[in-house]
Image (cartoon, rainbow, N blue to C red):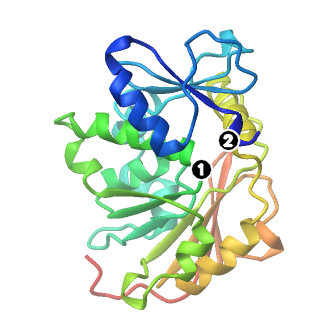
């Protein structure tokens, strides 16, 4: 679905001024809540920004919540630096690489890495998804428990390949992380809803191979690609090593050994 098919609506009158600012920022029309909109509806409520699919009311809205649910569970019980994601990135005692997340999405993996101490630059090419993520980050920043974690996360909206190609040498991150869109088959209804809505919104990632090649040129030490456990490697390019969990695989492309002075 083209993002031009999305409209904005206000959940309550008190957010009218914020709604107009968001409309100008995203170049989206404002429609009455409950209107017969043929596409998705971005709804601004006093609590948060939500993405609705009017034709599927039982599906519920999509929004970013880094304080509860899956994000909170992973932060508290995910396994710390011993979990597969952290090991793939190269986290260990005395080493905390800087990370560029080239496919930020809803920000969950980036939030896990930031909670483990990494400085994160997050790239998201969809202005709608970026707006949802920014709203979630701003709400999380007001929470005393996770405020310091969110301070380590910086979001930039734009095409990841273009941004990577334009990096100056001193801006190159230690690690570049990718989680390209893929037709996952998860049992969780929540994940199914999110993947379905995101795919309808932004489509599949047809440039994953180009992104991997650009990432390998710019990462100082390694590129990590998250894949479903049985999926092919991106572009058929074999990684240096793989780390597996029951449903997920991390393909690691090593450019260089980590410097011994990493913090």
Q: Is residue 104 left or right of residue 248?
A: left
x and y, in percent, of residue 198 in the image: 67, 38
Q: Is residue 251 left or right of residue 142?
A: right
Q: CA distance from mark 2 to mark 1?
A: 8 Å
Q: Nearer the viewer, mark 2 or mark 1?
A: 2
Q: Secondary structure at mark 1?
A: loop
Which residue sits at x=35%, y=42%?
137
The residue carrying mark 2 is 3
- Image height of 70 relative to 3, above or below: above
The foreground one among 113 and 3 is 3
How many numbered marks, from 0 up? 2
> Could one spot residue 196 in this view of the protein?
yes
x and y, in percent, of residue 67 in the image: 34, 31
The foreground one among 135 and 27 is 27
x and y, in percent, of residue 133 in the image: 45, 42
Disc 2 vs disc 1: Cβ atoms closer than 8 Å?
Answer: yes
How packed is label 1: few (under 14 Cα within 10 Å), some, or many (20 or more)? some
Which residue sits at x=29%, y=81%?
262
The residue carrying mark 1 is 126
In what quadrant of the picture does the N terminus appear?
A: top right
The label on residue 59 is none
Name the image quarter holding residue 154. bottom left
Name the image quarter holding residue 213. bottom right
x and y, in percent, of residue 252 in the image: 61, 72
The answer to which of marks 2 and 1 sits earlier in the sequence is 2
């Amino acid at each position: 679905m083209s993002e031009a098919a999305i409209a904005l609506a206000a959940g309550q009158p008190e957010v009218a001024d914020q709604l107009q600012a968001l409309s100008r920022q995203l170049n989206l029309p404002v429609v009455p809540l409950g209107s017969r909109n043929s596409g998705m509806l971005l709804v601004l409520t006093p609590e948060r920004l939500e993405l609705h699919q009017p034709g599927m009311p039982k599906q519920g809205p999509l929004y970013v919540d880094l304080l509860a649910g899956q994000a909170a569970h992973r932060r508290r019980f995910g396994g710390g630096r011993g979990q597969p994601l952290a090991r793939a990135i190269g986290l260990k005692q005395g080493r905390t690489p800087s990370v560029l997340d080239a496919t930020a999405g809803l920000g969950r993996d980036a939030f896990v890495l930031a909670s483990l101490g990494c400085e994160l630059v997050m790239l998201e090419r969809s202005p709608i998804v970026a707006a949802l993520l920014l709203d979630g980050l701003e709400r999380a920043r007001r929470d005393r428990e996770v405020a310091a974690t969110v301070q380590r996360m910086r979001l930039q909206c734009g095409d990841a390949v273009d941004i990577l190609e334009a990096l100056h040498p001193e801006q190159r991150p230690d690690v570049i992380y990718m989680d390209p869109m893929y037709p996952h088959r998860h049992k969780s209804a929540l994940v199914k809803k999110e993947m379905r809505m995101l795919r309808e919104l932004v489509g599949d990632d047809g440039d994953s191979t180009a992104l991997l090649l650009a990432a390998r040129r710019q990462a100082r030490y390694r590129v990590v690609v998250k894949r479903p456990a049985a999926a092919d490697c991106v572009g058929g390019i074999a990684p240096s090593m793989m780390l597996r969990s029951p449903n997920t695989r991390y393909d690691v492309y090593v450019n260089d050994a980590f410097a011994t002075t990493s913090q």
